[in-house]
Amino acid sequence: MSYLKRDSPEMRTIQKCAAANNIAICLGFSEKLTMTRSTCHSHSLAKTENIKIHRRKIKPTHVDRTVYGEDSGGSLMNIVDEPEVGRVGALSC
């Protein structure tokens, strides 16, 4: 299985593409955190190449929840104000 790292050449490519095309991106993916752990994340990438939201899935699916547990609740703030667009958020189901 392939994983995307937050600080990686691939993520920087996505950020640069968003900025070059003047778009905001909301992206869900599995991120490699350590050699053995992965969790689901969602990002909102601003037009300026900055990541405005980095949050974990609050209630992971069965196997991930059994092995790694649930999120701490630090991901409850998941809406940002995006100029010219409005309030942007993402579902975590």
Image (spheres, grey):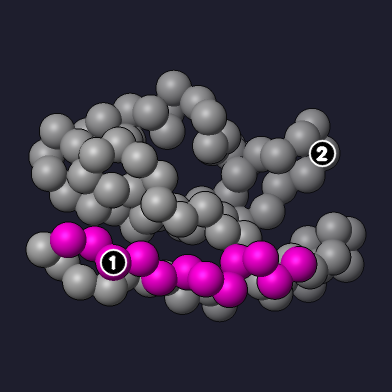
Q: How many marks?
A: 2
Q: Can I make out residue 57 in this image?
A: no
Residue 39 x/y as whole percent: 68, 53
Pointer 1 residue: 81
Could you tell me the amino acid type at mark 2?
Answer: Thr
Magenta stretch contains residue 14: no
Image mark for residue 36:
2
Q: Is residue 50 above or below residue 7?
A: below
Asked if residue 78 is positioned above or below residue 5 in the image, the reply reads below
86 on left or right of 60: left
Toward the top, the furthest residue is 9
Lateral position of residue 18 relative to residue 28, left or right: left
- Residue extending furthest right? 67
Q: Image height check: is 13 above or below 22?
A: above
Which of the marked residues, 1 or 2, is nearer the chain's N terminus? 2
- Find numbered disc 2 in the image and state the secondary structure of the residue it sits on: loop
- From this viewpoint, is residue 74 visible? yes
Specify the amino acid type for callout 1. Answer: Asp
Magenta segment: 72-83
